[in-house]
Each structure stands twice: as structure tokens, then as C-alpha cells.
Image (cartoon, rainbow, N blue to C red):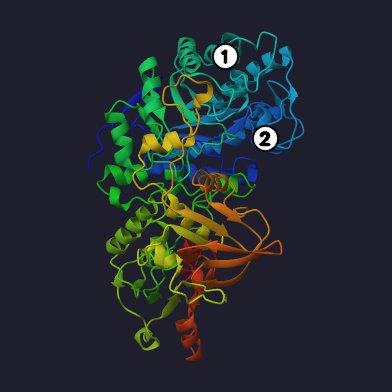
Amino acid sequence: MSFDHLLSPLRLGTLDLPNRVVMGSMHTGLEDADDDVPRLAGYFAERARGGAGLIITGAYAVNAEGRLEEGAGDIATDDRIDAHRPITDAVHAEGGRIALQLIHAGRYGRHAASVGASSMKSPINPFQPRALTTEQVWQVVDDFAAAAVRARAAGYDAVEIMASEGYLINQFLAPRTNDRTDEWGGSAFARMRLPVEIVRRIRAALGPDFPIVYRISLLDLVDGGQTWQETVELAQALQAEGVTAFNTGIGWHEARIPTIITQVPRGAWLRYTRLLKAAVDVPVCASNRINTPQLADDAVANGDADLVAMARPLLADPAFVAKAASGRADEINTCIACNQACLDHGFSGLETSCLVNPRACRETVWTIRPATRRRSVAVVGAGPAGLAAAVTAAERGLAATLFEREQEVGGQFRLAMEVPGKEDFADTLRYFRRRLEVLDVDVRLSTTAEPADLEGFDEIVVATGVRPRLPQIPGIDHTKVASYADVLAGRVTPGERVAVVGAGGIGVDVSHWLTHDPKEDLDGWLARWGVDPTLTRPGGLTEPRPHDPSRRVTLLQRKATAIGKGLGKTSGWAHRAVLGQAGVRLVPGASYERIDDHGLHVVVDGVSRTIEADTVVVCAGQESVRDLYEALVAAGRTPHLIGGAELAAELDAKRAIAQGTSVAAAL
């Protein structure tokens, strides 16, 4: 497909963009130390080489109080200019264009010096902010303008003002966080004064044509947020002050509606971008849960947006644009919106990477080098670890043969993609299948590899994965017992009353699968979460309308801790909320006594209970499958053991893909 709309050029002020793809801002953890600048430059250069029309950096604070955390990156003083030049030089050397994102974290700043529109503490930050004085707000305006001037001096082609997701500017705009009585608070006009003054001052400092992108909050999705009419009036006022284009953000970080994770439907927010586009005369950029060139092209073609911002998709595949432009869209390594290695890492103080592309943010320190001589490699098992190993080996020029006992590749990943909201996982398997074809890997499906089959190979990688673990519960062999694999693969149809044994990630996913509405469309999804379709309520919120599930599900675990506590940092709360929407009963601290015709018998807090169930689904972890590995070792071979076969964990594809890539890179 040609994707002519997405790949058409666009002019922003003095800046000519070759296409409409914007690599949206994402904080990687490399912005905070000068020693990491070469790595950050290499990271951005690879995306510029891959064809991104405009790259936007992670957030850089305009002053010390506005930093995301102590020691976080800033452009608050003139001596920071030189530190940024290697970044802009690297991008320009690849023919790319890059904008610096300017931020003031406000009450989201995780440090003792944090400030805000008011002194109200954020529910997601332990630090209490200090309310800015009237004069200090004017200083913030000056600091934004000075930072923009430094950005231009450092070689950036544009600046983006971060004014969404609940950061300082957003805090001034919303009654939720602005109870001021001076010139910066009160009426909607007074609350929008800060962004208007910031844009006015930056435009005066940079001249009439330097591109200023303003990241506007389309929907705050919090109580006490802005109304849609206020958002439109703000956009029109900012356009009058000289904004070149609007990028869009959805929801504050403290919002209780998911906006970007995998269970959010693709393109969920395009209808709101379209409404903003109709209200202004400058380009508008769509964002959030747009991860394919087709969806992005449709957004431009249908008039939903003029540009499309994709942050995580370009983390997953730096060559996203180049592949789309050269007719190789089926070779794109698609972002699956899992958040496991990107946002979960970022909000945990870890270095950002990507589950499906573990080289992300490590481009200059983790290179996949051609093999010095052609050797043969057998990879046994085509789950995520084995697929990554086979592809990486072939990319290095090794002769790779992939053995898989099932009729399809994917292993446990094929089960994961059956979970509602994780359909995107199928794209990862599509990517790997295509890479196997392009690299001419010898793929042998429906083949159980025995030690004799592996004679003659120079290297053997064993990625035989895991099998569901069956706990030692009396009655575990009862006819009403099924493993999660049997249920998700469609081999067992559960009854109306289901007990789920084991409440880790798999148990939560299975409970969601058991209770979801397969007919739910985007309107139904928005209604279930409580997004106002009329845009008449502040913050874009209305009363949630959960559907009535067809099954009654009880989710149990042995641990007495809260169920779902170990789920992902940035997505676990939403997965737990889905259980609540479906009325799933949560039973922690359960000791399992037996399973019989009546159901599952447990003891909780010393009291015996019977969970009446037509089906008992076991999600009690996995066991490594190592028979082949042990046989090879016994025969004197030295195979490499990776993935679940090496360590049985809860379908840890992040570790599996990284390990498969790393092992094959070192062969």
C-alpha cells in the first residue's frame, strides 16, 4: 500500500516536513546525564534515518523547580546549549528534523522543590507542592521563553510546549488544581492566561516563523477538568498568539481511564482530534494508540488530523516510515502498547527500552554484528525467545533452522493475543513470520526435535518454553478442571460459574477473557469507562456504564496481599479496574482444599468456603520444559537455554525476546 496521505509533505512555519509522521515525545532516561548524550544522539539518529518526519525529544525542564525529578534533564541555563548540539547534529546528519519539548512538571515534580498552581498534592506523587506566587508565575513565563531561545541556539528545528497530561500548564487550566484568586485563577479566561502568555512570549523571542508546537489536553479525564468549550477557546487564543501546530494529549497521569495501554482500542481518540481540527486553522496532530501506517494514513485521509504522533511505535521500529514508504509495511515491528519496557521502566526510574525491540535506547551499545564465518544454528521452539534467536542469528548471516512442534509459531504468545485488548500481540507474530521469510530461515513446523535431529549443527539454542503447572489439589483431575491454555486456545468452553485459581497476570487476563463482551465496539468501550460522548461535562467524564457479564467469575490466590499488586506499574490499575467492572469476586489468602462436583473448596481466614463452579480454570504458574536440553547435556552437547525453558515466569516476553536476541548476537 502507498500511504500517500501519511507520506505527503507538510510545512510548519519555516520547517518543511517530508511526511506527516511525528515521533512523539517519550522520556527515555537518557535525557538526564551528559554521559548519556551520545546514546541519546544515536537513538534519535536511527529514527531520523528511518524516515520520521519530525522527532520530538523527551521533556526538558525550563527551570530547576520544573524538573520531573531531582537530576532530571533541563535546558534552564545557557551552559546547557552545548550539551544538546550532539543530538541535533546527529539528527541533521541523517536528514532529520527535531523539536525540543519544554516542560514544567508542576506538582508532578518528584522532588522537594516542586511547585504548582496551588498547593494541592497530586495523588500519584508523595511530594507536596508549594503554590507559586503571582510574580513567580511571571518568572515561569520568562523561563519558557528563555528555554525556547536556547533550544533554537542548540540547533533544534522547533519547540513543543508540554501542556497536557496534567503538568503545570494543565494544572493552571483546570479548576481541579487551580484555586487561585489572583490574575492567574478564577475564570476560564484567567486560568488560560499562563499558556497564552507563554506562547506570546516565545513567539516574540523566536520571531514570526520558527515552529511552535503546543501539546494541548483534548480531554483531561479527571474531575474538575476543563470543559470542551474551554479547550476550543484556548486553542483559538493560542492560534492567535502564533502557535504553528497543535499536538494532542489525552488524560492526566492521575486519570482513572486508560488512554494508551493495549486494552484501549486503536484510534480511540481520533474523533476528538477531528473536532479540534475543525475549530482551528493550523495543523493538528493526532496521538495515542495509533500504531500502524494504515490507521495513520486513514486519519489524515479522513480529515481527523494533519499529522500523526507515534512515540512507542517508533521505539518498536525505528524504520517504521521507511518500511511503509518502500512497500514493506508487513515488515514493521508493531508496538503492542504493553508498556512493560517503556513507560513501566520510565515511571520506575529504569532505562526505557521496548519489549518487541530490546535494542531500543541501546543502539550505540548493543550492535548486531555480522558473523565472522557462516555457521549453522538450530533453534528449538518458536515462542518469543526462539523467534528472536532465529531472526537475530539469520540477520547476522548464520544459517538458522527453527524447529517447532506445533503447527504455528508463537508459543504462549498465541494465547496472550486471545485476551481482550491484547489482539495487537498478533502483529508481533506477523512480524516474526515475515522476518523468517525474508531471511530465508529454515522453519520446520509440526516437528518435535530430538537430539539426533540436531547432529551436525554448530550451535543449538533450546527455547522449548513452558507448560502450565498443575498444583497438588485433591480433585485436580476432575472433569470440570481446565488449564488457562485449554481455555484460551478454545479447547474447553467454560460454564457460567467459573473459579480461577491463581491471580497473577495470567489469572487476571483469563478473568477478563471470561467476562468480556465480544460485541463491544468503541462507543461501548468509552461508555464502560465513563467518557462523555456529548463533551458537555468538565473533564470529559460521565458515569461509567459497565456491561452485564455472561459469567460469574471468582478469582483466587494463595497470597494474602491485594490481587493484582504485581501487575505493570502503568497498566495494572486498569486491569484491576476491568475486573471490578465485570463484578469479578476477588479472594486473596485462599488455601485450596479440594475440587469436586460442587466446585472449589477453600479456607479463607480460617473459615471453610465452597466456590460453586461449573469450571475451575488453573492459572497457577508454569514449569520449564527442559527434556531436550537435559538430553543434549547428557549427550555431551553444550546448548544455550533461553526463555521460559531457562526460567519459568509469567509469560515474560520482555525477558524472552531480549534473551533470545542477546544469545544469538553473541554466537
Number of disc labels: 2
Find the distance from the CA under tag 1 to the CA under tag 2: 23 Å
Residue 564 left/right relative to 651: right
Task: From this view, report whether residue 255 is shown above or below residue 474.
Answer: above
> Going by the image, does 95 lie left or right of 345?
left
Q: Residue at x 67, y 56 (%)?
A: 561
Quadrant showing the N terminus: top left
Looking at the image, can residue 652 be seen? no
Q: Give the residue number, with chain letter if any, for mark 2.
A: 123
Q: Secondary structure at mark 1?
A: loop
The residue under label 2 is which amino acid type? Pro
Name the residue that disc number 1 marks: 192
Residue 358 rendering spot, x and y as whole percentages: 49, 56
Foreground residue among 135 and 569: 569
**Residue type of the residue flagged with mark 1:** Met
Residue found at the far bottom of this picture: 635
